[in-house]
Image (spheres, grey):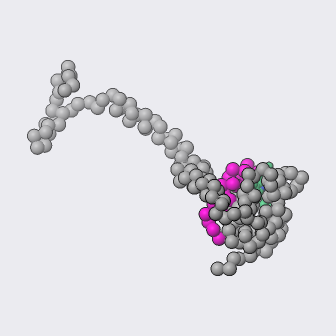
């Protein structure tokens, strides 16, 4: 029983013989409460500001994508031909892997959602160096504009990386990023559809 010098005052409530006393909360408890209140705006700003990659859901998705990338054995060594690209465009799990590769390497120049920055907008209908799906793989592997768009063939650890990030880039077409640069280049024909 804690000893108290103060006379304890009852609130006069009694439930089943249990009386309610007006004791103060322990100071450690009150400080914990104050600290959670002080922390909450920072927590809110950090995790709920809408910045990509911060929310628990985003972090989970990144972990899942990285894990899938470790499972390249399942798909073998891909070729960057049209049939392969069309096939993987229809597989969200692998488009997600492409997205993980994009997030790690391309965001600085093309924006978090592909809206463009130093590099062009990848979400609109206009392209500078691309007429068909396979051109994306070529541009990414070999680079263009004298290295302004770097060649990734030797930088990405696995050959599949360039192909899957190309699939992700293809999937961005028609999406509406929050910030988008004006279209560059000329409009091109729609991507071919897979056989359902
Ligand atoms: C250092 C900046 C930089 C980085 C990093 C970068 N790019 Fe680029 N990218 C560019 C620039 C600049 C161009 C446009 C070149 C031009 O104007 O001819 C470009 C062009 C492209 C194009 C062709 C667009 C078109 O309209 O024809 C694609 C596709 C592309 N980049 C994909 C990627 C992907 C995928 C990555 C990550 C693996 C990446 N880029 C990383 C700067 C970059």
Point out the stretch of residues depicted in magenta.
Answer: 89-112
The stretch drawn in magenta includes residue 173: no
User: Position of 118 compared to 41: left or right?
Assistant: right
Q: Check if residue 106 falls in the magenta segment.
A: yes
Q: Nearer the viewer, residue 150 or 42?
A: 150
The kind of secondary structure the magenta stretch mainly shows is helix
Percent of width and height locating residue 139: 82, 60
Asked whether residue 55 is in view, the answer is: yes
The correct choice, above or below, for 193 with respect to 136 in the image is below
Q: Relative to 79, is 24 on the left or the right?
A: left
| Residue 193 vertical placement versus 68 (above, below) | below
Q: Residue at x 54, y 46 (%)?
A: 47
Quarter containing ligand 1? bottom right
The image quadrant where one finds the N terminus is: top left
With respect to residue 12, does 94 lie above or below?
below
| Residue found at the very far bottom of the displayed protein | 195
Residue ID at (18%, 33%): 21
For this orientation, the residue located farthest to the top is 5
Image quarter where the C terminus lies is bottom right
Above or below, 33 against 169 in this view is above
The quadrant where residue 175 appears: bottom right
What residue is at 68 percent from the left and 68 percent from the top? 88
Residue 181 shows up from this direction: no
Tell me where residue 188 appears, x and y as whole percent: 80, 71
Near-viewer residue (76 or 158) = 76
Q: Residue at (60%, 54%) from the top-left corner?
A: 67
Residue furthest to the right: 146
Q: Position of residue 25 (x, y in %)?
A: 29, 32
Residue 60 located left or right of residue 82? left
Residue 173: percent from left, percent from top: 71, 66
**18 or 184, nearer to the observer:** 18
**Which is nearer the eye, 114 or 59?**
59
């Amino acid at each position: 029983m804690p000893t108290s010098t103060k006379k304890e005052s009852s609130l006069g409530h009694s439930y089943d013989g249990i009386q309610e006393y007006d004791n103060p909360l322990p100071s450690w408890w009150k400080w914990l409460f104050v600290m959670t209140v002080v922390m909450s705006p920072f927590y809110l700003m950090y995790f709920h500001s809408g910045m990509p990659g911060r929310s628990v859901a985003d972090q989970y998705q990144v972990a899942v994508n990285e894990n899938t990338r470790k499972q390249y054995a399942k798909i073998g060594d891909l070729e960057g031909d049209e049939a392969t690209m069309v096939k993987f465009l229809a597989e969200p799990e692998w488009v997600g892997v492409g997205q993980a590769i994009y997030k790690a390497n391309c965001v600085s120049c093309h924006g978090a959602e592909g809206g463009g920055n130093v590099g062009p907008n990848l979400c609109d209908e206009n392209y500078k160096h691309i007429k068909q799906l396979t051109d994306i793989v070529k541009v990414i592997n070999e680079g263009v504009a004298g290295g302004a768009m770097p060649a990734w063939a030797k930088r990405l650890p696995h050959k599949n990386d360039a192909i899957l990030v190309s699939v992700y880039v293809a999937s961005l077409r028609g999406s509406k990023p929050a910030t988008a640069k004006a279209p560059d280049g000329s409009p091109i024909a729609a991507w071919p559809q897979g056989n359902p």
